[in-house]
Amino acid sequence: MRDNLAKAQALLANSKGIEFFNKKDYFNAVALFQEAANKKPDDKNIQENLIKAKEQLQLQQQELETQKNGKDAVLKMQQSVQAFTQTLNKVPSTGVLDFDGQNYNTTSKGNGLDFIAANNEVPTDKIVNKSRMSLIR
């Protein structure tokens, strides 16, 4: 009689585990399949269900980790863009952005990044060739 009770409990746990598995709730499915396997360790179907649920749980956890890493990367990128935007908004009256802490004058050639303030005209030697996307000198 005790064996019949254990068998019935194992089949019930297996059945509930299948329901959770079909809902993609692999954590609860693993718990129920493990319970069923503990009550009926020789049942190959229960063992297979437990293995499949563990595999799916692992895949699900990896996917969540990947999504988390992607969100972290997006957040870092947004912070970098915000910091860069703040730097661009702090253009000094000379029109030269100071990215590395060194002071460059507006007439320097090649040492640093020379930007021209918005109210100045762009010299012809600074026009960008759109087909090559490089400065023409």
Image (cartoon, helix red, strand yellow):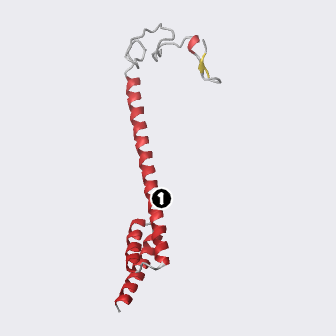
Closest to the observer, 37 or 109: 37
User: Relative to 105, does residue 6 appear above or below in the rendering?
Assistant: below
Secondary structure beneath label 1: helix
Which quarter of the picture shows residue 54?
Answer: bottom left
**Residue found 49% across the figure and 77% down from its top:** 44
Q: Residue furthest front?
A: 42
Closest to the observer, 102 or 127: 102
Q: Where is residue 120 in the image (x, y as percent from the top left)?
A: 48, 13
Q: Which residue lies furthest to the bottom in this view?
A: 1
Q: Where is residue 91 in the image (x, y as percent from the top left)?
A: 39, 19
Q: Residues within 10 Å of mark 1 (few under 14, many from 20)?
A: few
User: Which residue corresponds to mark 1?
Assistant: 59
Which quarter of the picture shows residue 128?
Answer: top right
Q: Which residue lies furthest to the top in this view?
A: 107
Q: Quadrant of the N terminus?
A: bottom left
Classify residue 68 as left or right of residue 131: left
Q: In which quarter of the image is the C terminus?
A: top right
**Residue found 39% across the figure and 11% down from its top:** 103
**Residue found 41% across the figure and 69% down from its top:** 30
Q: Position of residue 125 (x, y in %)?
A: 58, 11
User: Relative to 119, does residue 107 appear above or below in the rendering?
Assistant: above
Closest to the observer, 49 or 24: 49
Q: Residue furthest left?
A: 2
Dot 1 amino acid type = Leu
User: Relative to 91, does residue 39 appear above or below in the rendering?
Assistant: below
Q: Where is residue 35 in the image (x, y as percent from the top left)?
A: 37, 75
Q: How many marks?
A: 1
**Residue found 37% across the figure and 85% down from its top:** 6
